[in-house]
Amino acid sequence: GKTQWTYTTGNKIFSAPFITPKLVIVSSCDGFIYALDRKQGTVRWKYNTNYPIVACPVVTEGTVYIGSSNGKFYSLKLTDGTLNWTCNGLQGYIESRPAVDKERVYIGTWGAMFYAIDRRSGEKIWEFDTKRGRYFSPGACWPVVLPYMRQGKPNEQVIVLSSDYFVRSFHPGTGEIFWASDEAKGRESLGFSPDGKTIYVKGIKNNITAADISHGTYTSLWNTSMPYESNFIPTRMETTEQLVFIPTEFGVLHAVRTDGSGIAWSHKISHSAITSLKNAGKGKIIVMTMDGTVTCLEYPL
């Protein structure tokens, strides 16, 4: 838990970094995307977008993908930060982390839009509009590409939860909606079982809902009531095979059993919101809160 190194950018950081074996990729409101040496914290390269950026990067196959606050989406070379392409004309600013498959990258915006972009050319393949305005956008949720089985054949689906309370599953190539559900009344916070077969949705009231999505459909499994009246924090959930970790806006972390039998344990960390979680394995979870505290909790396996 001791500090190994510190690097200060030119403005605030609201994004989550992406960690590779050698680099830490992070964006800043100073307009730059940074590649920092993982061991030393020194700058290996940086790319200037000339606009404050709060989006979270993702790295796959030697490429950095990241959205921005100025209607643009970028593809950069991981080795030196040079630009591959820019996709222009996206509506609304981007804060979430993209999902990527072999052909496309997927991202939602605070312009009520969800986009699929070609990984090679940067061209928009398809787009989805909630048609309910910016306050009902898939802007905060990190989308996920997951496999499923249909008629004995493996397929893929792109899943995102919008602040219009709908969690949707899209066909990766066409944007066709496989299924959509507002049963759980969640806004942004999703979790998935390690095998990708079960989705967990944190409702805005006092509910956690689990559903089977392994066959390309949404089938409810269980609903657990929580010991609070509401919980609007958009922080993503972390999961293990046995537990779903539920962040709250009042600094309490709950561990809910994945068999639907209720809460395993609860721990008060802070009086401020839990802003991020990271499962560290071997019965440990790292929790960050809005008051600037990083806490590592150990729990029974």
Image (cartoon, rainbow, N blue to C red):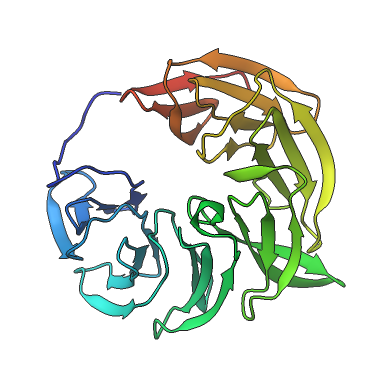
Locate residue 231 relative to residue 134 in the image: left or right.
right
Please provide percent x and percent y for residue 58.
39, 59
Residue 66 position (above or below residue 293): below
Please provide percent x and percent y for residue 125.
52, 82
Pick whichever, 296 or 176, lies toward us.
Answer: 176
Residue 293 position (above or below residue 86): above
Locate residue 267 relative to residue 30 in the image: left or right.
right
Pick whichever, 138 or 210, lies toward us.
Answer: 138
Pick whichever, 228 or 156, lies toward us.
Answer: 228
When asked about the image quadrant of residue 232, the answer is top right
When asked about the image quadrant of residue 242, the answer is top right
Quarter containing the N terminus: top left
Pick whichever, 228 or 260, lies toward us.
Answer: 228
Please provide percent x and percent y for residue 268.
51, 13
Q: Is residue 182 visible?
A: yes
Please provide percent x and percent y for residue 197.
73, 52
Identify the residue at image location x=82%, y=70%. 150
When asked about the image quadrant of residue 257, the answer is top right
Identify the residue at image location x=70%, y=42%. 185
Identify the residue at image location x=48%, y=20%. 251
Q: Is residue 190 visible?
A: no
Identify the residue at image location x=52%, y=66%. 113
- Counting every numbered tag in the picture gives 0
Locate residue 233 relative to residue 42 in the image: left or right.
right
Residue 151 position (above or below residue 20): below
Quarter containing the C terminus: top right
